[in-house]
Image: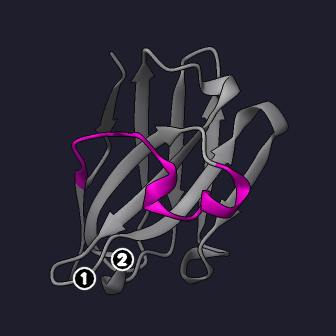
Amino acid sequence: QVQLVESGGGLVQPGGSLRLSCAASGFTFRNGAMAWFRQAPGKEREFVAAIRQSHSNTWLADAVKGRFAISGDNAKQTVYLQMNGLKAEDTAVYFCAAGYPILSSLRSHTGYRHWGQGTQVTVSS
């Protein structure tokens, strides 16, 4: 059974930083992809970042380019999301996802079979 456990969420001031972690079990990270999605109140789930560890490829949503970075540790089966320069509009529940998406589905929630429980990120002064 695949399990994804997120951690690192919390309350930060605008301009602050957070680092989210997602630890995977029952999933071969090096053979698939892992991603971060987020969902704000009243909004649809949106893509944030993805990584294919076997190819060292990463993708970022336009809204977070230059501020966020995704990375992975294959030995720990863990993916990270470093978030800098946080804005109020980044407030959302952040979900970790894992699967074997084709390239055209890499930025879509339909491309991932496994999901974590989510961790709350709140940016407010």
Q: Give the extent of the magenta segment.
A: 102-119
Can residue 4 be seen?
Answer: yes
Q: Image check: 7 left or right of 99?
A: left
The residue located at (50%, 66%) in the rendering is 48
Residue 115 figure quarter: top left
Q: Position of residue 70 (x, y in %)?
A: 61, 51
Q: CA distance from mark 1 to mark 2?
A: 12 Å
Exactly how many numbered labels are in the figure? 2
Does residue 105 appear left or right of residue 7 in this picture? right
Q: Quadrant of the C terminus?
A: bottom left
**Circle 2 sits on which residue?**
90
Q: At 24% from the left edge and 49% from the top edge, which residue is drawn?
A: 118
**Three-letter amino acid code of the residue under disc 1:** Lys
Secondary element type, mark 1: loop
In which image quadrant can residue 93 be found? bottom left
Check the image and report above or below for 79 versus 81: above
- Whether residue 110 sits left or right of residue 65 in the image: it is left
Q: Position of 111 compared to 124: left or right?
A: right
Name the residue that disc number 1 marks. 43
The kind of residue on which mark 2 rests is Asp
Label 1 environment density (alpha carbons within 10 Å; few <14, some 14–19, many ≥20):
few
**Callout 2: 10 Å neighbours few (<14), some, many (20+)?**
many
Q: Residue at x 55, y 17 (%)?
A: 76
Q: Is residue 45 magenta?
A: no
Q: Disc 2 on helix, strand or loop? A: helix
Q: Nearer the viewer, mark 1 or mark 2?
A: 1
